[in-house]
């Protein structure tokens, strides 16, 4: 069997030149890609509708899976007994464009509050909160200079960049700051602000629908539901006891989530948040086999220069790791994606005008 190299978890909505993503994928020897932006397929339209004949020739070897990431609320009790609703992510693969109008209608109706969540007013409130908490813990930073900007519009990113400033990062890590933030500042929101055991915890219940409602809508579209980055919600930092507790919560939330949502189709068994924990890799692989789940994997790519097809330990995410991708994935050629992207653009534009009155 020839080697297939996958990159199945990627975000390109903020890339000004989206072709950079395909160029990077080719450099990393990708065969099959999925774009999994949050709550939209617009990047498929933006990317594939702007390719010229030279691009088509350059990228013709690539195949594509239609994907999307959505966030929903899940009730969880940590091993310390803390009960809360956690904003967790879910991946949809093989989305049907034929049924996409109804699904996109669902998204527009159920995520209307996100305009406030993303607003500078709300993000400033979050930033003021996380700065206050960071100072109370004893983290060092130029707090007066930690501000929202056009390039850094979210509180989680802003505080993360401030705390990992070269002048302070070693001290802050010695105080328990997550070392992963040095290379992945986006991790702060998931590992800390969504973590009910963290002092930085924020309840996002008013912004996101219930997880079971999202799963039902994905299945009504005839798409598949995958549970991604299952270890992403607890920071593996601090002393050995705290790190062990974080991993135990990761095991627990995975088991609880799968028990509560038995209709799940697949599990993301390769993701940077699993660090280099072979025991956790083995656990996910065994869970997938035991529960007869499909498997996927990706790096959560967000910007040019990041890895797309290489796991945390720089091994390819390939068909030796993801053994049943060909059993579940609907793969499209570049020419097919160009045609499908036109329909995607029409549907999203039409539904936005109809639902939002724009």
Image (tube, helix red, strand yellow):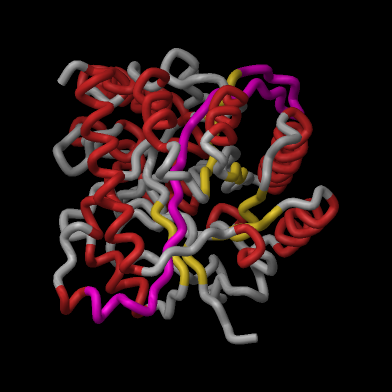
The spot of residue 267 in percent (x, y) is 66, 50
Q: How many marks?
A: 0
Residue 129 drawn above or below residue 134: above
Q: Using the image as rendered, state which of residue 23 and residue 304 is in the foreground.
A: 23
Q: Using the image as rendered, state which of residue 110 and residue 313 is in the foreground.
A: 110
- The part of the image, by quadrant, that contains residue 301 is bottom left
Left or right of 332 on screen, residue 271: right
Q: Is residue 98 magenta?
A: no
Q: Is residue 237 shown to the viewer in this render?
A: no
Give the magenta range: 56-84
Which residue is at the far top? Answer: 206
Please report the residue visible at 55 percent of the width from the left and 77 percent of the height from the top: 4
Please report the residue visible at 65 percent of the width from the left and 86 percent of the height from the top: 1
Residue 257 drawn above or below residue 136: below
The spot of residue 210 in percent (x, y) is 56, 20
Q: Using the image as rendered, state which of residue 67 and residue 207 is in the foreground.
A: 67
The spot of residue 116 in percent (x, y) is 28, 18
Left or right of 138 on screen, residue 244: right
- The part of the image, by quadrant, that contains residue 81 is top right
- The part of the image, by quadrant, that contains residue 198 is top right
Which residue is at the far front? Answer: 98
Question: In which quadrant is the C terminus drawn?
Answer: top left
Which residue is at the far bottom? Answer: 2
Q: Is residue 57 magenta?
A: yes
Q: Is residue 290 shown to the viewer in this render?
A: yes
Please report the residue visible at 56 percent of the width from the left and 40 percent of the height from the top: 222
The spot of residue 298 in percent (x, y) is 51, 60
Please report the residue visible at 39 percent of the width from the left and 45 percent of the height from the top: 186
Q: Using the image as rendered, state which of residue 322 and residue 136 is in the foreground.
A: 322
């Amino acid at each position: 069997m020839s080697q297939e190299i996958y990159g199945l978890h990627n975000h390109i909505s903020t890339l000004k030149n989206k072709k950079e993503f395909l160029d990077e994928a080719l450099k990393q020897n990708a065969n099959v890609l999925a774009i999994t932006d949050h709550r939209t397929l617009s990047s498929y339209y933006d990317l594939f509708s702007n390719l010229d004949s030279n691009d088509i020739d350059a990228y013709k070897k690539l195949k594509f899976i239609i994907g999307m990431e959505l966030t929903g609320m899940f009730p969880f009790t940590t091993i310390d007994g803390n009960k809360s609703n956690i904003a967790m992510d879910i991946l949809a693969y093989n989305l049907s464009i034929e049924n996409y109008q109804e699904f996109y209608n669902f998204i527009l109706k159920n995520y209307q509050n996100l305009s406030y969540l993303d607003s500078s007013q709300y993000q400033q409130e979050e930033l003021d909160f996380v700065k206050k908490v960071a100072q109370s813990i004893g983290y060092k930073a130029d707090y007066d200079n930690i501000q929202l900007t056009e390039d850094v519009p979210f509180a989680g990113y802003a505080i993360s960049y401030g705390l990992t400033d070269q002048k302070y990062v070693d001290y802050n890590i010695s105080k328990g700051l997550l070392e992963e933030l040095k290379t992945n500042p986006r991790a702060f929101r998931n590992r800390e602000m969504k973590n009910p055991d963290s002092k930085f915890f924020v309840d996002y219940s008013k912004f996101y629908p219930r997880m079971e409602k999202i799963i039902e809508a994905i299945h009504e579209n005839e798409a598949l539901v995958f549970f991604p980055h299952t270890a992403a919600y607890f920071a593996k930092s601090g002393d050995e006891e705290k790190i062990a507790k974080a991993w135990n919560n990761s095991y627990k939330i995975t088991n609880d989530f799968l028990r509560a949502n038995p209709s799940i189709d697949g599990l993301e068994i390769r993701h940077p948040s699993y660090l280099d924990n072979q025991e956790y890799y083995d656990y996910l692989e065994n869970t997938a086999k035991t529960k007869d789940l499909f498997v996927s994997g990706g790096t959560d790519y967000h910007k040019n220069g990041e890895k797309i097809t290489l796991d945390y330990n720089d091994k390819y995410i390939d068909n030796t790791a993801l053994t049943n991708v060909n059993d579940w994935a609907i793969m499209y050629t570049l020419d097919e994606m160009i045609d499908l992207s036109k329909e995607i653009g029409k549907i999203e534009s039409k539904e936005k005008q109809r639902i939002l009155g724009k």
